[in-house]
Image (cartoon, rainbow, N blue to C red):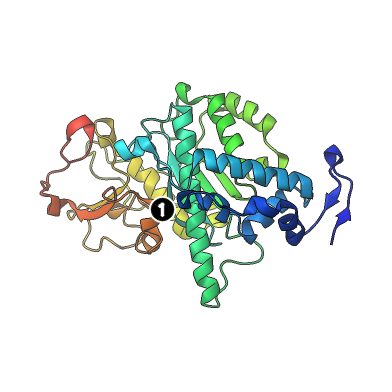
């Protein structure tokens, strides 16, 4: 049923999902090469409903946005292309899906220090939309399986299909203050409407304030309201004179993260912050896509809160699920104990280019 409501730009006709499908017509029918079928099949009912909500159910604006995204998808092929930089060097970027929060929303994490190629705005934007495409595919497969099993994901209060981003500003510097990077992000997010659940900016330095002022000015009000600044000074100190032992064996959890995302995510973030403060990082670079357990400090490496066995890949329940394999490059993620790799019990060895060996 079509109706009219006063909206900007003279686009007053609003309608339902069925109305939108009728208006789009053949635009949602794909007859090209099979490898590009995902450019259109992506627009299932859930995705189209998100477009409608984002454009306040205004049919013309929504249809125009869908067609613009179809063109963008055919040109950029996020459903096929992988990040070329990460294929050559997994330390090119650090953005990864680490699991699901207490509302069953997917949680993506990024760390500036861990991303060696972050100064290339085009490459970073490409990496981000490839990761987001993978995350959405994981959510769709999860929800389809739940529907087949008669299960409900999340609750009616929080949308489990929206993505939470945790941006750890560890390593952020002057070269990262790039308005162009922010513009790229705003542009490509337009092709994923109603997908942002929360964006947590963790420990932002003062020099980010200028960049944020520019970005905030162009963000839609609804988007800006989902961005939260969190300062966590809870990372424990390392024992003086011993770069291998923390003064406190358990990283304290930030209360805001725990309240909004749940204890599991909060503990993982706390452990990751702890892991990234290791003084050894001054000379080596962390293989965040690997899980290594030092047997010197842990007899039960899977124990929650055990810092010696922190898995930088993500939550254990997610890593051990079938969905994790959908988000990583083969051969770039595995789990081994240091002793199985022939490591000395005296500590780490630095390899080529400062990478753990």
Q: Position of residue 236 (x, y in %)?
A: 37, 44
**In terms of image quadrants, where is residue 99?**
bottom left
Label 1, residues with CA under 10 Å away: few <14, some 14-19, many ≥20 = many
Query: Dot 1 corresponds to which residue?
Result: 268
Which residue is at 46% across, 44% downward?
130
Residue 177, horizontal then vertical, whole percent: 51, 24
Residue 341 to residue 117: above or below:
below
Q: Residue at position x 33%, y 37% from top?
A: 91
Helix, strand or loop status at disc 1: helix
Picture layout, residue 110 above or below residue 265: above
Measured as percent of width and height from the top left, residue 340 is found at 13, 54
In the image, residue 326 sits, relative to residue 72, either above or below, namely: below
Within the image, what quadrant is residue 285 found in?
Answer: top left
Report the side of 348 relative to 117 (left or right). Answer: left
- In this view of the protein, can residue 254 be seen by the observer? no
Q: Does residue 330 show up? A: yes
Q: What is the quadrant of the C terminus in the image?
A: top left
User: For the N terminus, which image quadrant?
Assistant: bottom right
Number of numbered labels in the structure image: 1
Percent coordinates x, y for residue 221 in the rendering = 72, 40
Q: Residue at x 24, y 38 (%)?
A: 243
Residue at screen point 30% across, 62% down: 302
Residue farthest toward the bottom in the current orientation of the protein: 150
């Amino acid at each position: 049923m079509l109706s009219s409501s006063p909206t900007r730009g003279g686009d007053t006709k609003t309608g339902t999902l069925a109305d939108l499908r009728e208006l789009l017509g053949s635009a949602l029918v794909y007859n090209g090469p099979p490898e590009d079928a995902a450019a259109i099949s992506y627009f299932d009912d859930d995705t189209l409903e998100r477009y409608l909500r984002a454009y306040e159910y205004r049919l013309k604006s929504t249809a125009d946005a869908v067609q613009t995204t179809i063109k963008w998808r055919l040109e950029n092929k996020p459903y096929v292309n992988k990040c070329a930089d990460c294929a050559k060097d997994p330390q090119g970027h650090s953005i990864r899906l680490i699991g699901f929060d207490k509302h069953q929303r997917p949680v993506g994490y990024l760390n500036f220090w861990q991303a060696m190629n972050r100064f290339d705005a085009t490459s970073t934007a490409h990496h981000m939309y490839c990761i987001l495409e993978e995350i959405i595919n994981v959510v769709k497969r999860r929800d389809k399986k739940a529907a087949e099993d008669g299960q409900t994901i999340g609750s009616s209060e929080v949308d489990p299909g929206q993505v939470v981003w945790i941006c750890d500003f560890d390593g952020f510097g002057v070269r990262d203050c790039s308005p162009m990077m922010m513009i790229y992000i705003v542009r490509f997010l337009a092709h994923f409407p109603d997908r942002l659940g929360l964006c947590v900016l963790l420990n932002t330095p003062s020099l980010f304030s200028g960049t944020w002022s520019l970005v905030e000015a162009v963000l839609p009000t609804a988007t800006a309201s989902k961005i939260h600044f969190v300062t966590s000074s809870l990372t424990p100190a390392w024992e003086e004179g011993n770069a291998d032992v923390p003064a406190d064996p358990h990283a304290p959890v930030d209360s805001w993260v725990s309240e909004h995302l749940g204890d599991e995510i909060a503990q993982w973030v706390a452990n990751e912050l702890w892991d990234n403060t290791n003084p050894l990082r001054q000379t080596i670079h962390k293989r965040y896509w690997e899980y290594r357990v030092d047997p010197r400090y842990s007899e039960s490496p899977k124990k929650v809160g055990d810092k010696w066995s922190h898995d930088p890949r993500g939550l254990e329940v997610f890593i051990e699920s079938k969905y994790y394999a959908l988000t990583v490059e083969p051969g770039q993620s595995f789990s081994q104990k240091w002793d199985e790799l022939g490591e000395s019990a005296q500590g780490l060895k630095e390899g080529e280019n400062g990478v753990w060996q």
